Amino acid sequence: MNAAENRGITFDELYRIRVLDPDRYSQTEQLKEECGAFTEKIQTLNSVVKTLVDAVDAQSEKINDEKLRAVGMRNKAAAEVEVRRRKKKETKMMMLEKQEELERLNIEHDSLMKVKAEQELVIAKLSNSGGN
């Protein structure tokens, strides 16, 4: 049996054959339990990290949506400035056109008033000449 003990083969309390001596076997079992606990902790850590990454991704998506909305609002504001400038120019042009039309109509009115006055004068002369 000495040769077997030198090779590391032993019997435990229940007379089962063991390759490791009881101290090494208990250390191996303890290491196995510690590895199991470590594995559970790693899985818990992975779960926490996944939750955190999901939360960060969701927040990132919200931030990107807000950025897009802000860019859209900025573009809309810039476009509004351009629209107002264009409308102001159109209004100014329309006002100039209306002023020109008013001036033309005033000139036409004055001309028609002169023609009317001349015609009334002619009528008055004809009335006075026809009555003499």
Image (tube, helix red, strand yellow):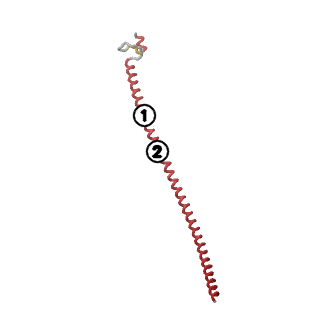
Find residue 9 and report its image quarter: top left
The residues tagged by marks 2 and 1 sit, at their Cα atoms, a distance apart of 23 Å
Task: Tell me the number on the disc at residue 62.
Answer: 2
Q: In which quarter of the image is residue 13?
A: top left
Q: Name the N-terminal-most of marks 2 and 1.
A: 1
Q: In terms of image quadrants, where is residue 94?
A: bottom right
Q: Examine the rendered structure and indicate whether residue 125 appears above or below residue 18.
A: below
Q: Position of residue 46 (x, y in %)?
A: 43, 33
Q: In the depicted view, which residue is nearer to us: 64 or 14?
A: 64
Q: In this view, does 68 lie above or below 123?
A: above
Q: Which quarter of the figure is the C terminus placed in?
A: bottom right
Can you tell which of label 2 and label 1 is closer to the viewer? 2
In front of the other: 57 or 49: 57
Q: In the rendered view, does 92 fall on the left or right side of 58?
A: right
Is 131 or 4 nearer to us in this picture? 131
Query: Dot 2: what SS?
Result: helix
* Residue ranking furthest to the left: 13
Q: Residue at x 47, y 46 (%)?
A: 63
- Residue drawn at x 61%, y 77% is 112
Count of numbered circles in the view? 2
Is residue 106 depicted above or below 121 in this figure?
above
Give me the residue at 62% from left, 79% from top.
Answer: 115
Q: Label 1 belongs to which residue? A: 47
Q: Where is residue 103 in the image (x, y as percent from the top left)?
A: 59, 72
